Image (tube, rainbow, N blue to C red):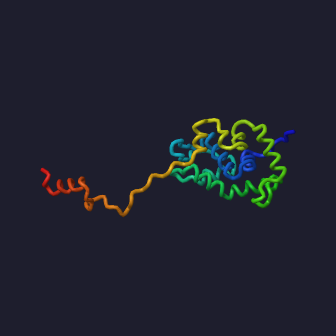
Amino acid sequence: MLVENSLDLNQTAYLCGGPGRAALTAILSLHQVGALSISAARHRVKSLPGDPANELERTVLATIPEAGQLLGSLREAVAQSPAMNELRTSLVERGLLHRWQVLGQTARGRRLCRQLRELPPPGLHKVAVLGAAAISDADLRRTFTTPDPARAPMPDPHRSYGAGRTDESALQVTTLWAGDGF
């Protein structure tokens, strides 16, 4: 016997997958309405003009700097935000999560999650229940299920790249500057 799920998208995501899943669905929701762009190659998220539907989505947009942010660090920042704490509190008040975080879901919360997994709802609610593996767009799913690319190393600030070099190319440049090369 299935009970009607009266939870919103973010509450469903938090209940079935925790703060990381709720952050995922908030980011995807904003992406669907065109308020975010996500680079598949670089995992870079940039905000675009858009209207967030709830406090968690406002937090996502407020977290992204103008230059953009890596997807993984954005998800972590949103998962640790005060808006996420408010979302958790709403589930505690509904009797779906224990007041003490280490205890997790109540029996009622576990039952609801089990029912949702047996017959997941369509669209973004399916992602809220099952996670990133349920994203229908293959490129977007790959972006959310693979780690962010490593940053390119910065040059060593203590290494000399100018006149103090002793390799052959530096000697040729020095010779040309001195006038001996012509």
- The vertical placement of 25 against 136, above or below, is below
The residue at the point 53 percent across, 47 percent down is: 44
Q: Nearer the viewer, residue 25 or 149?
A: 149
- The vertical placement of 116 against 159, above or below, is above
Looking at the rendered image, the quarter that the N terminus falls into is top right
Residue 88 drawn at (x, y percent): 74, 55
The answer to whether residue 99 shows anywhere in this view is yes
Q: Residue furthest right?
A: 1
Instruction: Please indicate whether residue 150 sits to the left or right of residue 108 in the image.
Output: left
Q: Nearer the viewer, residue 24 or 141?
A: 141
Residue 177 drawn at (x, y percent): 18, 56
Residue 41 drawn at (x, y percent): 51, 42
Q: Nearer the viewer, residue 115 or 62?
A: 115
The residue at the point 51 percent across, 48 percent down is: 149
Q: Residue furthest bottom?
A: 158
Query: For residue 138, what is the image quadrant?
Result: top right
Q: Nearer the viewer, residue 136 or 30?
A: 136
Q: Residue furthest front?
A: 167
The answer to whether residue 94 shows anywhere in this view is no
Instruction: Please indicate whether residue 27 sits to the left or right of residue 148 in the image.
Output: right
The residue at the point 24 percent across, 55 percent down is: 170
Q: How many marks?
A: 0
Residue 113 drawn at (x, y percent): 78, 45
